[in-house]
Image (cartoon, helix red, strand yellow):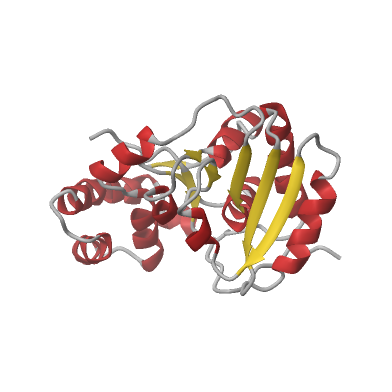
Amino acid sequence: MTQIIRRGFIPSDKIEFDEKNLTLLKKAQKDICYLINHGYGIDKSVEFVGNHFLFSTRQRLALKRSISSYKDITSRQKRKILDKYENSTLHIDGLNIIITLEVALSNSTLIKCMDGTFRDLAGLRGTYKLIDKTDIAIDLIGKRLDKMKIQKAIFYLDSPVSNTGRLKLRILEILDRYNFDIEVLLIPNADVILNKLDHVVTSDGIILNTCESWINLAYEIVKEDLPNTSYIDFEISY
């Protein structure tokens, strides 16, 4: 029986990301942006500023995932594909988009980041379990891809993560009814493959910095198909 779970739900988020703390987090965001735009690394910058504001581990994680340098954002925006998907092959970071949609469906903490993507705070730690939102998330992807009239979707799943074999079967079963070809690959490290390809579907910042082109699919699905989803907005303009 599939577990009923709120993916990424942490009760303390209600306090850690309340109005008062969000005000502090956005002040810290400006300080961190200044540092990384002057050559400092994101990890050390978040640590330094986070210590000043006495932020929790989870608050620091939200800052780290939401903030990007001006250089990175500019580069990512130039390579983002906004239309003309017809007959293309999409390379999909499977766990990345499915978990983000599961978090959205769970009404757990979701962040709109500076590069315009949605990211979550749900950590894998080498373990993934199918939950009651998994099938819904996969089907949302399928419906969106079908509307885009793509030719083929290739999902890349990290084989060292537990249960990715079961996830592969669910993807193949659920998306079989749609009008595009499906392939699901279990590979040791999806990032190594995806960061060199075009038409990549992910919100992973490392991949976005090096891939040929990308599609902000999770964001499009949440905004159009899950319009009542709440999120923390860290998007700011430089």
- Locate residue 31 relative to residue 220 in the image: left or right: left
Instruction: Write the residue at 73% across / 32% down.
Output: 146
Please state the total of marks drawn on the protein image.
0
Quadrant where the N terminus is found in the figure: bottom right
Instruction: Write the residue at 34% across / 61% down.
Output: 60
Instruction: Write the residue at 67% across / 73% down.
Output: 162
Foreground: 234 or 40? 40
Looking at this rendering, what residue extends furthest in the left direction?
A: 38
Foreground: 158 or 228? 158
The percent coordinates of residue 232 (x first, y second) are: 44, 43
Q: Is residue 167 above or below residue 104?
A: below
Q: Quadrant of residue 238?
A: top left
The percent coordinates of residue 24 (x first, y second) are: 27, 50
Instruction: Write the residue at 68% across / 44% down.
Output: 153
Determine if residue 133 is in view. no
The percent coordinates of residue 224 (x first, y second) are: 61, 29
